[in-house]
Amino acid sequence: MSHEQINQHLSNWTERESTAEAMIPLIGRLYRKNNVVTSVYGRAIINQSVIDIIRAHRFVRQVEDSELSVHDTMPILEAMDKLDLGRAHVDIGKLAVKFKEEGGDLTEFLKREIGPVVGQYAAQSEADANNETKDVVLYGFGRIGRLLARILIEKAGGGNNLRLRAIVVRQGGADNDLEKRASLLRRDSVHGPFDGTITVDEENSALVANGNFIKVIYSDGPDKVDYTEYGINNAIVIDNTGKWRDEAGLGLHLKSKGVSRVILTAPGKGDIKNIVYGINNGDITEDDKILSAASCTTNAITPVLKAIHDEYVIEDGHVETVHSYTNDQNLIDNYHKGSRRGRSAPLNMVITETGAAKAVAKALPELKGKLSGNAIRVPTPNVSMAILNLNLEKDVTTEGVNDYLRDMALHSELQKQIDFVNSPEVVSTDFVGSRHAGIVDAQATIANGKRAILYVWYDNEFGYSAQVIRCVNQMAGVEYPIFPKRARD
């Protein structure tokens, strides 16, 4: 290779960096002014670094026949910035690929593809100004609670979104309780540092995170808080303690002034609707005061199961989850009321039960009685896998199943729930921070005759938290149209 060719590689990289740098203010303005969330093939590019933006474009080579460059998406952003858009999720990567195929006038192309939100900024702003504040309260501040807080804080700058107003916890007993809770939000051994700044306001018992004033309320019961005292009204409470899971227990929240609705971050019992966003969130009505966001595993497997059932029809099957250990297990051998869970979690693989397979039927009734399930807890702190061993009505091939699931991940209404990876080198840590409910590992797929075995990764903390927030958005009436509707006919 000549010296000139070697230098050309660096020159090309520098040009991509420069273009990505120029994209950042456009991405930020579209988000903070128009409430437009931009992504590249499902990878969000808001508040991302230059390298992260380039990496998001690089990912496209795994799922398309050709690569995508920032030089392809930059004109899309520039044109969108001039269209006075209303609130939306817009995948500029898919738009760029489609535009390269179709050609023509870019502005006219965008008016066809995202027409419903073109010129809607003023109308959307007026509607937002007339809406009530979407107050959110986190009841509990454990693993899921802190990740929910990160997502809510991150999204607070994009207009009339959900607003985290308070966190309710039990008194920790330490003199520096607030600082300890701030530190847990600020630093995370799995998910890394908080992206921003956090200040402790001892005088007002609050945390100020990226400008968000979050009241910390100490209480020993869900019915013992008057939220209106803190200016919180019509709030949605996200109970992430898991302590109350039936209507009687969760209904205690509704006895507190300022609360309008409650959602549980665990499977609900009794007649509580278990919602897997993307599957049965259409069942949510204004009359539903108490809802459940089901479990992380149910959220991970149900979208993939629906996709497979719609195309091939599932006759029966078995779901085996290989799940990271959780706070419910013991660090060292000690008494535990559950079978085997008393044995040291960091030292053992632990066979335990899971209700996820049966819980699928609550969101997808057509699979009732068709699935069995079990779980193995393993010595990793986060990211789990579900192995779906399915007997089907139709003949399948590995290539056919993978092509179908790839298309579902990229172009269907389940694109926020199903992700797709086709690399022979990925391992569990590669999916830390994934906001999809589950990620199909194409390299591991086995399909032949009327049988398919699918391997689905999922960040059982972050991916699940993203699903919860999607449910809360719908409960609050904050929903985004997604574009393009379909990248290909």
Image (cartoon, rainbow, N blue to C red):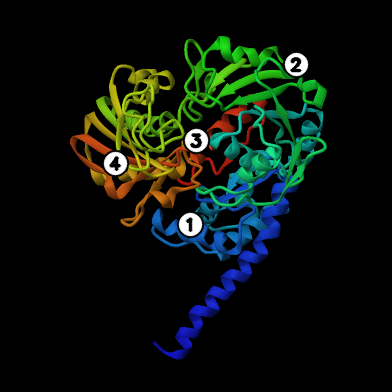
Helix, strand or loop status at disc 3:
helix
Marker disc for residue 464: 3
Camera-nearest label, 3 or 4: 3
Sequence-wise, the earlier of marks 3 and 4 is 4
Marker disc for residue 257: 2
Sequence-wise, the earlier of marks 3 and 1 is 1
Q: Label 4: which residue?
A: 401
Callout 2, which amino acid?
Answer: Lys
Q: Is residue 353 visible?
A: yes
Marker disc for residue 101: 1
> Gap in Å between the C-alphas at discs 3 and 2?
29 Å
Q: Verify CB contact (< 8 Å) between mark 3 and mark 1.
A: no
Q: Residues within 10 Å of mark 2 (few under 14, many from 20)?
A: some
Sequence-wise, the earlier of marks 3 and 2 is 2
Callout 3, which amino acid?
Answer: Tyr
Q: Quadrant of residue 301?
A: top left
> Gap in Å between the C-alphas at discs 2 and 1?
56 Å
Sequence-wise, the earlier of marks 4 and 2 is 2
Helix, strand or loop status at disc 4:
helix
Q: Residues within 10 Å of mark 3 (few under 14, many from 20)?
A: many
Q: Quadrant of residue 262?
A: top right
Marker disc for residue 15: none
Percent x, y for residue 423?
Answer: 34, 55
Helix, strand or loop status at disc 2:
loop
Callout 1, which amino acid?
Answer: Glu
> Gap in Å between the C-alphas at discs 4 and 2?
51 Å
